[in-house]
Amino acid sequence: MVAIDRQPKPGRQDVLSALADGEIPDALAEQVIDHLLGDPVQRERWLIYHAQADAMRFPTPSSLEDRAFLDRLSSRLASEPIHMQAASRAVAVRTTRWRRVWIRYGMPGAAAAAAVAVVSWMTYPYFDDREPSAGQLMAAQGMSKRADAPEMVSQDYLLAHQQFAPSSRLHGVAPYVRTASATVPVTTAASPVRTHP
Amino acid sequence: MTRLRATSWVVMLLALHAAVAVAEDVDQGLRWLERVQAAPMRTNYTGVFVYQQGQSVQSSRITHLAVGGSSRERLEMLDGQPREFIRNNDEVRCLLPESRTVRVERSVQHETFPALIQSSAREIAEFYAVRRTGSERVAGRECDVLELVPRDTMRYGYRFWADRATGLPLKAQTINEKGEIVEQIAFSEIRIGGGIDRALLRSRWNTEGWKVESTVASSTPLTDWRIVSPVPGFKKVREMRRTLAGHPEVGQVVFSDGLAAVSIFIEPLREGRVMQEGIASKGAINMISRRYGDHWLTVLGEVPASSIQQFANAVEFQPSASKP
């Protein structure tokens, strides 16, 4: 792991743009993000940067242009318990890597979902359709995928939940509509928690 | 003397009438609710509805017909992934064209949980104030607006627009503790009653060569786990060991208050499996995933995030003493 100067010389704003555009290599990116997330001012800049960048590229939900929303977001992140901050960091790392893949492969816009993805409590990486191209993209990031059973995604749990929910018994298959998503996938795994028994 | 007695009779009668009137309002609300709940299974209909949550909008066509002695249904997503859900009585087939997979699920009705039998409207009324608040037109039909206001902040509220003729909900909203609409489903066009083409129940897909995943479930209690419902009104309605997306030995426990449900999935950690801890929210659904010792918990349901958190915290591992 390469040590990073905690006071990046080009100026923090430039580091932010470089980070957001995927120009900082992974090994450094994690440390930079660590540094950014540890500083409330930088965290807010990170959020605003994404909102602005995406406003130029993709349609932006109005909430991200809302100053009050960003303020609340910032203070909410500041008051997160430690384990949630770790999750925020993990999501921020994934967002950075994913952004590089997006730029390289020209994936269609995700309606500023990238900026929203920094907000850990709002985004779970798999809360979307399991796209057939996801396997290719994961391979592109050097992840190995088990050949037998595919990864369980939140869609699977949601389908399983809907199966036995009283709403299904009463309303038939209509509640299954909750399992669909009309939005483009947000992120898929880049540096998840790998567990071993 | 006579006038006084007459007056006191009048007063008593008025009081009695008022008391009866109040009781009738509650009963009336419950009758509305029962009608709304029974209608989808009783009515033949086909229509297009729009499902909205957050920034996402999804149109779908749904058709329900009683054919012979069977209840058959088909939901076809019209936007995005062209998924289909086809139900024939208890069996639901989920067609996932993006992965050429058919998931077959059977929701067995003759379970021994008394709570699975439809929660009476009266039980629901214990936790929701039920009342009719007006009438509106939806999809060209006159509807009665029914509100279910939760008596606490641990569950969502609901608003139903029920077709006056049949009770079928033509529009429904789920409302959070701040009064915001977290999800809405509304028919934009609907045809109710006779003359509906059975061809609408037929899938557009030829699923030959698709992978078929059948859920295998056995209603065995999860003996090593104890979950005491932390939210009043939520009772355990299902407990089983099942396969989930091809993975065996996933425990599922479902709690419900008659309207909303929470599922708790418990599975062993699998070697090399990629796991993500986190909290997520999508529309009315909140979800938590976290590690619990050698196991992995996933808790989700259509309740506020704080209630999902409470359910997750209520899971206890209590291994039985005698183990081989």
Image (spheres, coloured by chain):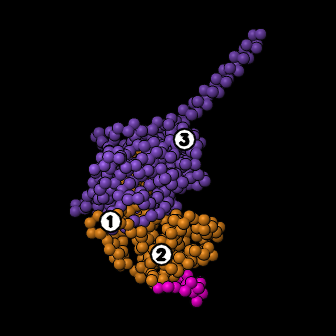
Q: Give a yes or no on whether discs 1 and 2 share a subunit.
A: no
Mark 2 and mark 3 on one chain: no
Quarter holding the N terminus of chain B?
top right
Q: Position of residue B62 (x, y in %)?
A: 39, 52
**Badge 1 and badge 3 both on one subunit:** yes
Residue A97 figure quarter? bottom left
Mark 2 lies on a secondary structure that is helix
The chain letter for the residue carrying disc 2 is A
Dot 3 falls on a residue whose secondary structure is: loop
Q: Circle 1 sits on which residue?
A: B271
Image position of B277 (left or right of B12):
left
Q: In the image shown, does B97 or B138 lie closer to the viewer? A: B97
- Spatial CA span between label 1 and label 3: 43 Å
Residue A137 is covered by the magenta coloring: no
Residue on which disc 3 sits: B127
User: Mark 2 — residue?
Assistant: A93
Specify the amino acid type for callout 1. Answer: Glu
Q: Nearer the viewer, residue B108 or B191?
A: B108
Q: Secondary structure at mark 1?
A: loop
The residue segment tinted magenta is A2-18
Residue A11 falls inside the magenta stretch:
yes
Colour of chain A, in one word, is: orange
Q: Residue at x 31, y 54 (%)?
A: B249
The mark closer to the camera, 2 or 3, is 2
Q: Is residue B140 visible?
A: no
- Which residue is at the far top? B1
Q: Position of residue B136 (x, y in %)?
A: 56, 46
Q: Is residue B317 visible?
A: yes
| Circle 3 chain | B
Q: For the view shown, which residue lies furthest in the left direction?
A: B209
Q: Earlier in the sequence, mark 1 or mark 3?
A: 3
Colour in which chain B is shown?
A: purple
